[in-house]
Amino acid sequence: MIDWDDVRYFLAAARGGSVRAAAKRLGVNHATVLRRIAQLEARLGAQMFEKLPSGYRLTAAGEEVLEFANQMEATSHQLETRVFGRDQSIRGLLRVTLPPFLATHLLMPDIADFARLHPDIEMEIVSTGEVVNLTNREADVAIRLVSDRKTLPLNLHGLKGPDLRAGVYMSRDRLAALRAGAPDPIRPIVTGGQAVPDWIDEGEFRAAGVPFRTPGADAQIAAARQGIGMTKLPCFVGDADHLLVRVPGIDLKSTATIWLLTQGETRKTKRVRLFTEFVSRRLAAYAPLLAGLSLSRD
Amino acid sequence: MIDWDDVRYFLAAARGGSVRAAAKRLGVNHATVLRRIAQLEARLGAQMFEKLPSGYRLTAAGEEVLEFANQMEATSHQLETRVFGRDQSIRGLLRVTLPPFLATHLLMPDIADFARLHPDIEMEIVSTGEVVNLTNREADVAIRLVSDRKTLPLNLHGLKGPDLRAGVYMSRDRLAALRAGAPDPIRPIVTGGQAVPDWIDEGEFRAAGVPFRTPGADAQIAAARQGIGMTKLPCFVGDADHLLVRVPGIDLKSTATIWLLTQGETRKTKRVRLFTEFVSRRLAAYAPLLAGLSLSRD
DNA sequence: TCTCTCTGGATCGTTTTTGCACCACCGATG
DNA sequence: CATCGGTGGTGCAAAAACGATCCAGAGAGA
C-alpha cells in the first residue's frame, strides 16, 4: 500500500518542477521531498520523473499519476471545507484575502475593530497580489473587486457591496503651478506594461510625454505627489490624500463592485457570517466615499 | 495542511469500528492508529469519532468525512492500477484470486507449472472464501464461477472458460451395500443453512432423513466418503475421487461457467496476459473433465 | 573564464514516529 | 466470582524520518 501523503509530495514536485521548489512550497527540507518521491516510485514500481540536472520533469507515467493526484487533492480540500463548515464555535482561525490597496487604505482599521470585538477569532489576512483560490480553502472569505461585466464563479456565494469609482489625480501644488502657467510636461503614471490610458485627452490639462511606469499602487501615489504627472486612483484613496486633487475636467470612472465572497460549506460557519456581516455594514457606510461623492474621509 | 495518510487510518478505523481492528487491517500497532486519528482530529479541529468503551463510532462530522475518504481511496486505487497497467516487464507481482475448491482440486498444479515457467513473476494466490474486489486492486486476475443468468460487472473484462457441471455423489461401498439390500437411510449432505435440495427425489436410491449439514466442500467430501449420505459436487471433484460414485438416475446439473476476469488497465500488463492465456489453454483442455464427460482424470 | 545560482544527491546528527509492554475498564461466560 | 477477550489510553525505548550541511555539476550572466 502506498503512503497517501507521498502523493502530496509528488504533486508539489510536479508543480514546482524541482525537488527544491517543492520543498519550499511544502515548508520542508528538500531531502525529504527527495526521499518521499523515491519511496513512492519504489512502491508503485515506476519512474514518475526524469531526473534532469535542471530539475524533475514528468514522465508519461507521471503525467497519468498527476491526474489522479489532482483529484485526490481536490477531494482532500472538500473534506477540509466540509468539517470546517460544521464548526460553529467562535474560537478558531479565519482567513481573509483582499486586494492590498483595500487593506492598507480602507479596511485595515475596520478589520482591527473586528479583531478587537472578537478576540477569540484568530485572524489571518492574506493580502498578497496573487488571487488565492477559495475552492482550495486557502482562504475562508475573499473581498474582491469584480468588474460589472464579469460573472462570479458559480461555486462561490457572493454578498454584493458598494460600487467603487476611480478618478484621475495629480499633485495639488502642481495643479496650482499649471494654472500659473508653468510649462513642464505632465506625464501619465501607469503600472508597468499597461497601455497608455484614454483619459490623457479628457482633462483641462493634458498629460503628455512618455508614460511613467511604476509597479504598485503606493509607488504611483508617491510619484503623483512628487508632481511627476497624473494617475488614476480609486476615489477613496485619492480624495483622502490632501496632497492630491482630481484633475479638472476628467469624469469619474465606474470601475467595479466590491463583493464579499465565501465558498460552499464555509459560509455556514459562525466566524464567517460574523465577519461578512460586519464588513458588509462598514462597506455600506463607506459607499459615498467609495463612489467619490465626498471629497474627504473626515 | 492535513496529512493525507491520516485519512487512510481514519478510513480503516471507520470500517473496523475500533482502533485495534483498524490496526490489524493496516498491519501496524494500535497505538499508531490512535495517534494518527488524534492528529487528524486536531488538525481538522473536529471530533470524528465518539470514543466509547466498546469502540469508535462515527460522529455526524465523521460520517461526512467518510464520504470523501472513500473517494480518496477510490482515486488512490485508480492511480495504482494506472501505473500498474503501464508496467510491461515480466518481473513483478501478480495476484490471482480463485475459489478454494478450484485451487485445491484442479488448478494448483497448473499454477505451479506457470510459476516454474516464469520464475521472475512473483505470484500471490488469494484463495480465501471471500470475494475480493478487483476494482480496488486487491487482485490482478480473478477466476470466478458465474451463473449463466447473472451478468458480469461492466468495468471488468472477461475471458470465457468452459462450463462447470456438477453431479450427486455417494460412497462406492455404500452404493454396493444398498444394491445388496442394506436398509440404512441415506442422508443428503448440504452446507449449513442451505435448503433441502431437489435432487433427493430424482435418483434410483432416495435420500431421506434430516440433512447432514457441514460447512466447507472438503468436509462434505469426507462425509460422503464415510457413507453418511449423498452430496452434490462439481464433476471434476467427484469423478476424481475413486471412493465416490455418481448416484444412479440423477442427471448432471449445469451450474456455471468459469470466467477469467481482469480489470481496466491491469490487463494490458504482460504478466496478466501471459497468465490468462496460459490458464485459458489449460482450462480448455479440462473442458470434458469439467463437463463430467470423462469419469476419471487419469 | 569566473562567479553566482540553480539543480539533484549523499552523509550525519537529531527529532519524530512507531512498536511494545502495560494499565484500567467493560461485558460476556464458565 | 473469577476469567477471558475485547475496548481505549499511556510511558518508554528502539527505529525510522527528518533537517542541516556539504558536494558535484549545469547553466546564466558579467
Image (spheres, coloured by chain):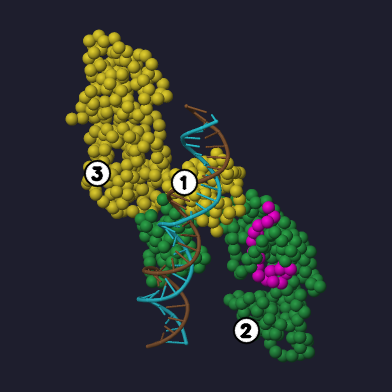
Chain colours: A yellow, B green, C cyan, D brown
Mark 1 and mark 3 on one chain: yes
Can you say whether A3 is above or below D1 in the image? Answer: above
Labels 1 and 3 touching (C-beta < 8 A): no
The kind of residue on which mark 2 rests is Val
Q: Find disc 3 in the rendering and name its residue.
A: A114
Magenta includes B106? yes
The kind of residue on which mark 1 rests is Ala
Say which residue appears at 36% left-offset and 33% top-offset: A146
Name the N-terminal-most of marks 1 and 3: 1
Q: Find disc 2 in the rendering and name its residue.
A: B210
Q: Position of residue B150 (x, y in %)?
A: 64, 61
Q: Position of residue A111 (x, y in %)?
A: 26, 41
Quadrant of residue A153 in the image? Answer: top left
Tell me the distance, in whole angstroms, between the alpha carbons under discs 2 and 3.
81 Å
Q: Find disc 1 in the rendering and name its residue.
A: A23
Residue A86 seen anywhere in this rendered image of the structure: yes
Span highlighted in magenta in the image: B89-109
Q: Is residue B75 left or right of residue A247?
A: right
Q: Secondary structure at mark 2?
A: loop
Q: Chain of mark 2?
A: B
